[in-house]
Image (cartoon, grey):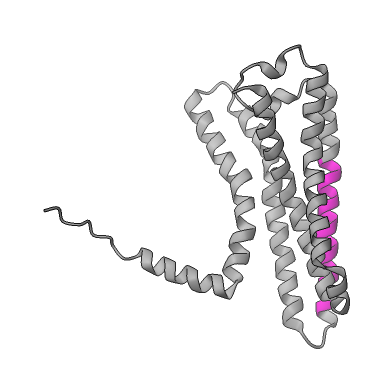
Amino acid sequence: MLLSACSVIVLLSTSASINTPLNLAVMSLERYVAICFPLHHVQLCTVNRGYIALALVWLIGLLPGISDISITYAYGPPGYFQGYFNCRRSLFIILPSQNIKQLVFNAVYFSSIWAVVIYTYLQILITARKATSDKSSASKGQRTILLHGVQLILSMSFFIFPLTEYLFQGQTLLPIRHVRFFNYYVTMVLPRCLTPLIYGVRDENFKKHLKVYLSSCRKKVQPLQSN
């Protein structure tokens, strides 16, 4: 496709990949405030602050993609964005310094998110042990943060994407396609599906309708008899 159109797709897909762990960190902080500071939860976690957090998450997610596309536009060959290519992110990495930039960003980014998740989990754990009442809420908070940790590990699994492709270099095209297909679902689709799926199943109203839908799917559909 046209590289200028590819840049929009790469920008959105890259920011979506970065947003997933950031959302987990923000949700962990919300659980931390709800359990460790329950009296201040209503004042701290307002709808307007939720919008601000959402805007910051998208801003941070867009920055790496915008910087790479801007560098490519500034230092790329003339007419580069008018060319047609197989769309991929590597097309926007044209300087060695961009790889270093990405490495530094990933190190700071994931270490910060892990620090938030671990800190909030430990604080909730301490609060749960001290609590004489409402232990169920603290226990649910612990399980939520642990779940976020599992999702964060899955989100970080996209680091194995280049490694698996490197290991299969020199193979025929068919195995490489299978590896890319597997990587796509494990590193891209699965981490993003877990949060809405788990929180949806935990919702009683959603769970009720889901059971009705699943039970109706068991019935075999008989085709109409043609005259």
**Residue 49 drawn at (x, y percent):** 84, 62
- How many numbered marks are there? 0
- Where is residue 73, by image quadrant? top right
Q: Picture quarter containing residue 100?
A: top right
Residue range of the region highlighted in magenta in the rendering: 106-128
Residue closest to the far left: 227
| Residue at 69 percent of width and 57 percent of height | 150
Question: Is residue 98 depicted above or below 207 in this figure?
Answer: above
> Closer to the camera, 161 or 11?
11
Q: Is residue 114 magenta?
A: yes
Q: Main secondary structure of the magenta part?
A: helix
Q: Residue at x 74, y 72 (%)?
A: 141
State whether residue 126 appears in this view.
no
Residue 113 within the segment the image draws in magenta: yes
Q: Point out residue 112 in the picture as x, y percentages from the top left corner.
A: 86, 51
At which x and y percent is residue 136?
72, 81
Q: Residue at image x 61%, y 18%? A: 84
Taking the view exactly as shown, the residue that stands out farthest to the top is 78
71 and 182: which one is in front?
71
Residue 51 rendering spot, x and y as whole percentages: 79, 58
Q: Quadrant of the N terminus?
A: top right
